[in-house]
Image (tube, helix red, strand yellow):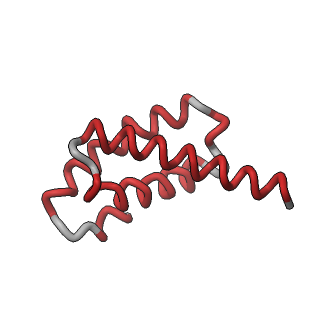
Amino acid sequence: MPFSTLADPDDLPGARAAHDPVCAEIQARHDLLLGSEEAERLRLAVIIAGLVPLAIDEDDLVLRAVEHFSAQTMRNQGRAVAS
């Protein structure tokens, strides 16, 4: 899991705690899902792991992860349409 790449072990609980709320938010918006549920959960975990050092707290991490996931999805959908 991407959380094993976190340099600070104190970041792990926050990353794990943010994962489920972000998943719920994204699953509620079907337009954001590009692949299988498992693939999207992994993509989300990678995003969360990358954002942990930037987040102020767990709520901020959830917000940033949803925003990043959404923006990444929109970029990927744009490439698919342009191809």
Q: Residue at x 58, y 52 (%)?
A: 72
Which of these two is toward me, 23 or 58? 58
Give how far across and how far down residue 3 sits, in percent.
31, 62
Q: Quadrant of the N terminus?
A: bottom left
Question: Where is the C terminus found, in terms of image quarters?
Answer: bottom right
Q: Nearer the viewer, residue 8 or 54?
A: 54
| Residue sticking out furthest to the top | 28
Q: Residue at x 30, y 40 (%)?
A: 60
Location of residue 57 (image quadrant)? top left
Count the marks: how many? 0
Residue located farthest toward the left when viewing the structure as drawn? 10
Q: Nearer the viewer, residue 63 or 10?
A: 63
Q: Residue at x 48, y 42 (%)?
A: 67
- Tell whether 77 sits left or right of 81: left
Q: Where 6 falls versus 29 (above or below)?
A: below
Determine whether, in the image, residue 78 is placed left or right of residue 36: right
Residue 18 image offset from top left, x and y in percent: 31, 43
Left or right of 68 on screen, residue 50: left
Q: Which residue shows up at 42% across the image and 46% down it?
A: 65
Residue 70: percent from left, percent from top: 56, 43
Q: Residue 11 at x, y = what percent?
A: 19, 57
